[in-house]
């Protein structure tokens, strides 16, 4: 006896970027197919000619690849030419290339008297009660009185979503339809069509929605919302183009992304990530994102939260999928991401960080291309990074010119560590600098030992030297481990920054010297 292979599919409409909700659907469909050594199909539902675009298709393919969700059948894996060499015998995998297949089945329904023409469109007769079972939502019964005949072919000759999805799932041998809850209500139409055409029904698994913590739907409008608020707080009245439309944006009359992006750029603002590509650009690691997404609506039990894809493939099942909506908890995702980053081997981390910096912060290119120094930089930040992108901000003081370090006499840490008690910290820094100057050869470790010895001799706490030194180097007390920091800075720039810092506060020193 042969059992039917498990076939799942992810069927995005290429009308925009791959959003985290879509990624979770794809993940579950992929994991289920992998668990059963079945096939995972990627099918592009591009029958809505006006809203679909090849750019969206390419973006979706690229994001799926980045996530590591490889499909066995579907468009070519190379995102730059998805239409070539489609993979698998059940293709083509673009609905826009399957029109004659749909026409054939639509004609069959017309001939059988199950569908009829109405104003140029073709409608399917819904005159029977429908019952179907969903793995998550249970048995659904819809009385014929509550059902209406519906369009299966539009007047323009294109099939509707309902017709295309049903034919494709049947012909491609899909055994499990895993998709978002927004399609639960469509399913009565789908099973009625399947029954009429004599196809077997697949198993249906509808996934509840992913919401923002305030219960609103997660959508690209969240970016507009955050940008609008920031623009209002900053009293921004123009972004340099389309002033009228921008005024309308501020007035909530439109949510245009170009304004959200322009505001973010001008105010140096981070917009909330919604799409997979947003998370990638912010420096999330696919493993952490997938791990977090898997927990939205599913859990492996036993309070286990952090796991890898092999674990998910082994443990995944429909019985632990919940009906209630899940809230997207950014703080939790961030902590998953920092754990995932800290667990990467150093080579992988430095490769990923290097790519991130060069792509999004080209001012780091020289540092990335200086392997010994970049290796120390990676050592310094791997344990502290929540995202790859955050490192660009945290480590910026290493790559700026010495003259760009800002020293601020009103800063709490500056007051405490440099200015307090007649500029005690500054005086210590000046004195320590004379010893540091003598240190040859110079290394972070030797400098660290020097600090230790210097402080022991004077019976002071090491912070009395290390904190002023951190401020001299970075303008703040937030730097990595002091030995590594000094290694990355090098002797010459460390001493130059100490001089600049002493200079910056010379007025305060003079006053206290009187
Ligand atoms: N193309 C549909 C969508 O993007 C998916 C339909 C399905 O999974 O059955 O929502």
Image: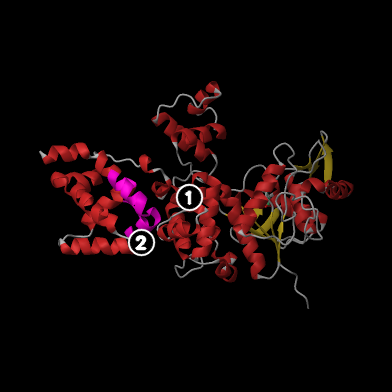
- For residue 453, which quarter of the picture? bottom left
The residue identified by callout 1 is 389
| Magenta stretch contains residue 480 | yes
Q: How many marks are shown on the rendered structure? A: 2
Q: Give the x, y percent position of residue 506.
A: 21, 39
Could you tell me which quadrant the C terminus lies in? top left
Q: Residues within 10 Å of mark 1 (few under 14, many from 20)?
A: some
- Report which residue position mark 2 lands on: 443
Q: Earlier in the sequence, mark 1 or mark 2?
A: 1
Q: Nearer the viewer, residue 188 or 501?
A: 501
Q: Residue at x 73, y 40 (%)?
A: 48
Q: Is residue 70 visible?
A: yes
Q: What segment carries the magenta color?
A: 474-499
Of all residues, the one furthest to the bottom in this rendering is 1
Most extreme residue toward the right, as rendered?
Answer: 111
| Left or right, 123 with reference to 466 | right
- Residue 1 percent location from the top left of the image: 78, 78
At mark 2, the secondary structure is loop
Residue 416: percent from left, percent from top? 20, 47
Of residue 456 and residue 247, the one placed in the foreground of this image is 456
Image location (x, y in percent) of residue 289: 53, 57
What residue is at 50 percent from the left and 60 percent from the top?
349
Q: Is residue 264 left or right of residue 465?
A: right
The label nearer to you, 1 versus 2, is 2
Is residue 323 something that shows in the picture? no
CB of residue at label 2: within 8 Å of ligand 1?
A: no
Q: Find out whether residue 471 is within the magenta segment.
A: no
| Mark 1: secondary structure | helix
Q: What residue lies at 24% left-to-right and 56% top-to-bottom?
A: 435
Choose between 120 and 418: the one closer to the eye.
418
């Amino acid at each position: 006896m042969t059992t039917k292979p498990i076939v799942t599919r992810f069927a995005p409409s290429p009308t925009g970027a791959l959003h985290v909700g879509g990624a979770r659907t794809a993940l579950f469909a992929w994991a289920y197919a992998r668990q059963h050594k079945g096939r995972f199909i990627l099918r592009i539902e591009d029958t809505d000619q006006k809203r679909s675009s090849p750019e969206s298709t390419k973006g979706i393919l690229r994001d799926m690849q980045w996530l590591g969700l490889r499909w066995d059948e579907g468009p070519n894996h190379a995102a730059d030419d998805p239409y070539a060499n489609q993979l698998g015998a059940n293709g083509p995998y673009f609905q826009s290339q399957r029109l004659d297949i749909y026409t054939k089945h639509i004609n069959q329904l017309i001939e059988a008297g199950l569908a009829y023409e109405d104003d140029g469109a073709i409608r399917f007769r819904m005159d029977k009660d429908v019952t179907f079972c969903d793995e998550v939502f249970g048995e659904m019964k819809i009385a014929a009185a509550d059902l209406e005949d519906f369009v299966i072919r539009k007047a323009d000759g294109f099939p509707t979503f309902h017709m295309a999805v049903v034919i494709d799932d049947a012909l491609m041998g899909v055994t499990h339809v895993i998709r978002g809850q927004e399609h639960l209500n469509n399913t009565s139409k789908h099973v009625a069509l399947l029954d009429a055409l004599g196809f077997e029904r697949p198993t249906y698994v509808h996934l509840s929605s992913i919401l923002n913590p305030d219960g609103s739907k997660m959508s690209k409008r969240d970016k507009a919302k955050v940008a609008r608020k920031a623009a209002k707080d900053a009293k921004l009245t123009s972004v340099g183009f389309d002033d009228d439309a921008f005024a309308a944006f501020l007035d909530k009359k439109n949510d245009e992304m170009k304004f959200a992006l322009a505001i973010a750029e001008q105010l140096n603002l981070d917009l909330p990530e919604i799409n997979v590509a947003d998370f990638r650009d912010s420096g999330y690691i696919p493993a952490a994102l997938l791990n977090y997404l898997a927990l939205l609506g599913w859990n492996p039990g036993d309070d286990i939260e952090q796991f890898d894809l092999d674990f998910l493939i082994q443990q995944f099942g429909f019985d632990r999928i919940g009906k209630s909506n899940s809230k997207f908890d950014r703080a939790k995702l961030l902590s998953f991401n920092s754990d995932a980053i800290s667990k990467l081997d150093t080579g992988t981390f430095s490769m990923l960080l290097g790519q991130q910096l060069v792509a999004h912060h080209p001012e780091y290119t020289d540092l990335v291309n200086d392997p010994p120094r970049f290796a120390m930089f990676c050592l310094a930040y791997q344990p502290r990074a929540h995202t790859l992108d955050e490192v660009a901000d945290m480590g910026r003081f290493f790559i700026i010119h010495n003259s760009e370090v800002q020293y601020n006499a009103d800063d709490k840490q500056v007051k405490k560590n440099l200015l307090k008690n007649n500029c005690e910290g500054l005086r210590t820094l000046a004195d320590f600098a004379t010893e540091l100057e003598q240190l040859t050869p110079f290394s972070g470790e030797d400098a660290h030992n020097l600090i230790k010895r210097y402080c022991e001799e004077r019976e002071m706490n090491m912070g009395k030297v290390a904190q002023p030194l951190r401020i001299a180097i970075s303008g703040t007390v937030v730097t990595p481990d002091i030995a590594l920091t000094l290694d990355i800075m090098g002797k010459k720039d460390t001493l130059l920054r100490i001089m600049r810092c002493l200079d910056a506060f010379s007025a305060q020193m003079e006053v206290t010297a009187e």
